[in-house]
Image (spheres, coloured by chain):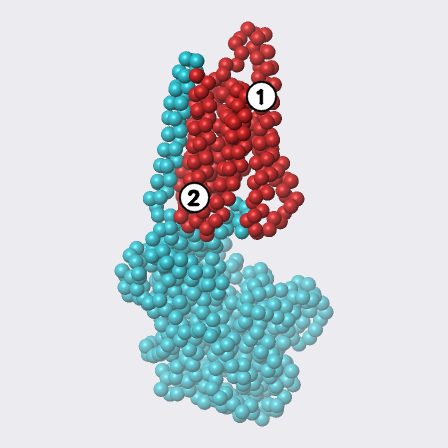
Amino acid sequence: ALESVPDLERAMYRVIQGSPCVRLLSMQGESGCANPGRDKIVAPLQRLTKLEFKTKGAVAVLLPYSLFHSFLDKTLHDPSFAAQVAGVLVEFADNANRSVNSNPDSKFPLAEFAPYSNKTYQWNPLGTDVLQKRYNFPVYLLSPESTRGLREIAAENEARNAKYPLQVAEFDVVMQTTKSGTHTSESCLKEGSCLPLGGYSILSSFSSITSKPTLLVLAAMDSISFFRDFTPGADSPLSGLISLLVAVDALSKADGIHNATKQVVFLVCNGEAWGYLGSRRFLFELEYGGGSAFGFNMSHIDQILEIGSVGQAVENTFYGHVQDKHASASTKEIVASLKRSAESVNAQITTASSENPGIPPSSMMSFVQKSDSLTGVLLEEFDTSFKNKFYHSLFDNADNLNPESIVAASSIVARAIYQLAMGDSSAKLDSVAVNSSLVKDLISCLLTPDPGMNCPLVTGFITPAQPVPNHYVGVVTGAPSPTPSDDLLDDTTRFIWNFLADRTRRLDAGECSKDCKGQDQVCVGATGQGRGSCVVSTTRYVPAYSTRLRYKSGNWELLPVGSGDFMDSIDPVWTESFWKSLTLRVYQQERPSLNGMLLLAGCSVTVASAVSILATRALFRKRLKSA
Amino acid sequence: MTVASGVGYTLIALGPGFSLFFLSIVSKPLLILTLLASTLVWLASLVALAIVWRGFLPLGSSDWICLPLLASSVALQEFLRVHFWRTFKKVESSLNGVAVRISKPPLRPSEKIEIAIALGFGHGLAHSIMFCLSLLTPAFGPGTFYLRSCPQMPFFLVISLISLGFLLIHTFSMVIFFKGYEDHNSGLRFFVPAMHAVASSLTLVNLVQNGCVIGTPLVMLCAALTLFVCGKSLWQKGD
C-alpha cells in the first residue's frame, strides 16, 4: 500500500539491482559497454527467446543467459540487428541452469604475448570470443530478484502487444571517456578521464632475501569476466593461488624451511589477465629497480614453478608444461621433484604433449619472453587445451572446483618445493603435510558469497570492505608504492599479504596496531578482529601495472616503447573510464502524444473557465442591476 | 510523464482556480485577505482532523476504514461552515459600521457574493493543497502510474479531476449556504452538507475495480450540479 509521495515515487520508478559491464580502453580503442552518448537511454522492455526482434524500433532487451553470448556475437556481425539494441538486461542463471556457451574469452587468450609463432592454436576451444569487443549499448547482469521482477514486467508489455503505456528501461551508463571524446588509453590518460588497470602483487619468502640461487614460485590472483563486479575465477586462476597458499602453510611446519639451501620466493601476481601486468612489472623492477629492490636480481632466479589451474584434475593427474627451448637441467630437476612428490600422494605428473606449440597462457610467458635464462615448469590440470569449460565465465565459481584436486596439487607443490629448497632429493616428504580443511576454508572465503570474506580465516587478519569476494584487478588508485596504505588495497590483496606474512614468519615480536619498529618486522592482522602482531617476515607488496606507464605528480604518463622489449610493444595498456553513476531503472511511459494532449487539456480548462467567469459575471451584473 | 503533462495535470486541477483568482480576486485586497484567511482555517481543520486520526494509526488495510474517515471529515467541515456564516455576519456588520462612519455605502449584494466565493475558494484551495498538489509532483518526471484498480485512467488524471470537482463544489457551496441563510431557505442550507457527503462518498467508488470510470465522472457531475444550483439560486433573486 502506498502511504506517502516517496512511496509513490518508489512504486513508479523501480531501481533495478544488477552488475554493469563498463567501458574499457586500450591503445587500439574501446571495448566493453556503455551508453553511446552523454544521455540516458530509454527503450521499451522486451524479452527475447530467440535472436530476432518482435517489433521495429529500439528495444531494451531482456535475455536469458543461454542466449547472451550468441546475442552479443550477432550484434557484432549484423549492424541492422545491433541498431535496434538500446540496452541489454541479462537474466541471472544459477549453477543448475548454467549454459555451456558462457566462456566469453577468445580461443587463445592473450595470444599476442605467446613466445611462439602459432597464435591460432586453440587453448580455449569453447571460447565464444565476445569478451574484449566494443559494444555501443549498456549491458547489465541482473540479480535473481530483479530477474523475476523484470520477467513479469516484460510479460506485461507483451500482453499489451507493444502498445502504450509501456514499461521502459532507463539506462544511465554514461562514461567520462565518452563525454570527453577520448577513445584510446593514450588520449584518456592524458585527459584524465580514465585510470589504468592494475593493483598489487605480493612477494614473500621464508627467510630474508639475499643474492642466492632462487626458486621462484608463482600463481596469479586475478581473473576477468564480462561483468567487472562478477568475476569469480575459481578454477582459473584462484585454484592455483589456493594451492600456493596451502603449500606455504604446509611448508611453514616443515623442518629447516627457514634455513633452506636454495632460496624460495613466492610471488602472487595481480593483473595477469590484462596482459601479465604483475609479472612484467616485477621483472621490470627486478631489472631496473637496483639489487636493493628485492635483495636479489634476475640472474639469481635459477628455477621457476608456476601453479596454474589445478581445480579440475582428472584422477589427480597434472601436467607439467615447459617452453621447449628452455628445457634444461634445472627444469628437469623441477619435473623430477614434482613426479616424486606426486607419487608420494598417489597423484600423477605427466609432461605436456610435445604437439603443443609451447606453454599455455600463463605468467610464465613474461619470464620466457624476458630472457632465455629464465626457465621453469607450469603445473596445470590440462594437457592440450583447457579443461575449464567455464573459463573466465560467471560460472567459474566454487561449484566448478574439485577440492580433492586442489589438495593433491598443494601436496605435490609443497613437497616438490621442499625437495628443491633443501637440495636433497631424498628429503623426508612425509613431514610436509597439507591441511585439506584449509583448502575448503580458502574456497569458502575466496569463492563463495556466504560467508565469503566474512569467514573467520579472513576476519582474523583483516576487516573486509566487501563480504562478497570478487577477483577483478580494478584500477590503480593513488600513487603506486611498495608500501601502499590499506585504503588503496582490495580485500583479497590484503588478505593474501597477511596470510603469507603470518605463515612465513620467523619470529614473533609483540603486539601492534599499525607499524612495527624492528628490522624486517611487519604488523600482521592490524585491521582484523583482534590486535595485530609484530612478526619478522619477508613479505611485501609489489605494484602491478603496465610497464608502459609511469605515475608522476598525480598523472599517468605513457612511456615510449623500450627498445627490444617485445611485450611492451604489444601491451594494450588497459584503462577503465571514470563515470559519475551507473543506474538502471524501469518505469511506465505514456505514448509521447498524450503528454501534449494533457497540456492542451489543462490550458483549455483554464481558458474555458476564464471565459465562463467573464460571461457569468457580465450576465449576473446585468441581472442584478435590473433588480 | 514529463513536464508537459505535469503542467497539464496541474492546470486541470487548478486552472479554474487560477482564472477565478486573477479575474475576480486579485484586484480586491479584501478578497485576497478573505481567501488567505479562509484557506488557513480550512487547512487547520484538516490538520486537526489528521492529528486526531493519527492516534488510530496503523489503520489496517481494509477499505471500510474510509467510511469513518470521510464521515468525520465531512461532519467537522460542515460544523465549521456554520461558524463561517456566523463570523461572516459579524464581519459584515462591523464593515457596514465602518462604512456608515466614513459615509460610504454598505456592502452591496454582489460584494457579499464575492466574499462568499472567496471563502468557498479558500475551502477548495485547502482541499487541493491537502489532497492533490503534493501527489502531482511525481507527474513531472518521465514515468506514469496506473492503479491496479484503474487501468483505464492514469492515476494523476483521476487525482486532478477529483480535485477540480471538489474545488468547484466547495467554492460554490459557500455561496449556496450563505444564500440559504439570507433567504431563510432551508432547502439550500441542507443541500450543501448533503452534496459534500454525497460527493465524498462517490470517491469511494474508485476503490472498486474499474470504479474510477464511473466514480470520477460522477464527482464532475456533482460539481456541475452545484454550479447549477448556485446559478439558479442567484438568478432567482432578480425576480
Q: Is residue A205 above or below residue A37?
A: below
Q: What is the secondary structure assignment of the residue under circle 1? A: helix
Residue B33, how many percent across, how many down?
A: 54, 23
The image shows a total of numbered marks equal to 2
Tell which tag, 2 or 1, sits nearer the viewer: 2
- Image location of residue A348, percent across then percent down: 49, 90
Q: Nearer the viewer, residue B50 or A493?
A: B50
Specify the subunit that label 1 lies on: B
For residue A180, say whether it is visible.
Answer: no
Residue at disc 2, secondary structure: helix
Q: Say which residue label 2 marks.
A: B214
Q: Could you tell me which residue is drawn at 46 percent across and 18 percent down?
A: B237
Amino acid at the residue labelled 2: Ile
**Mark 1 or mark 2, which is nearer the start of the sequence?**
1
Label 2: chain? Answer: B
Chain drawn in cyan: A
Q: Residue at x 40, y 31 (%)?
A: A606
Which residue is labeled 1 in the image? B88
Residue B52 at x, y percent in the picture:
64, 40
What's the residue type where badge 1 is placed?
Phe
Question: Which chain is red in the picture?
Answer: B
Q: Which mark is residue A372?
A: none
Query: Which one is in front, B32 or A366?
Result: B32
CA gap, disc 2 and disc 1: 37 Å
Q: Of residues A313 and B203, which is closer to you in this image?
A: B203
Q: Where's residue A131, x and y in %?
A: 38, 67
Compared to residue A133, the image places residue B189 above or below, namely above
Circle 2 Cα neighbour tier, 10 Å, few/some/many (<14 / 14–19 / ≥20): some
Q: Are marks 2 and 1 on the same chain?
A: yes
A484 sits left or right of A29 in the view:
right
Image point (51%, 26%), residue name: B188
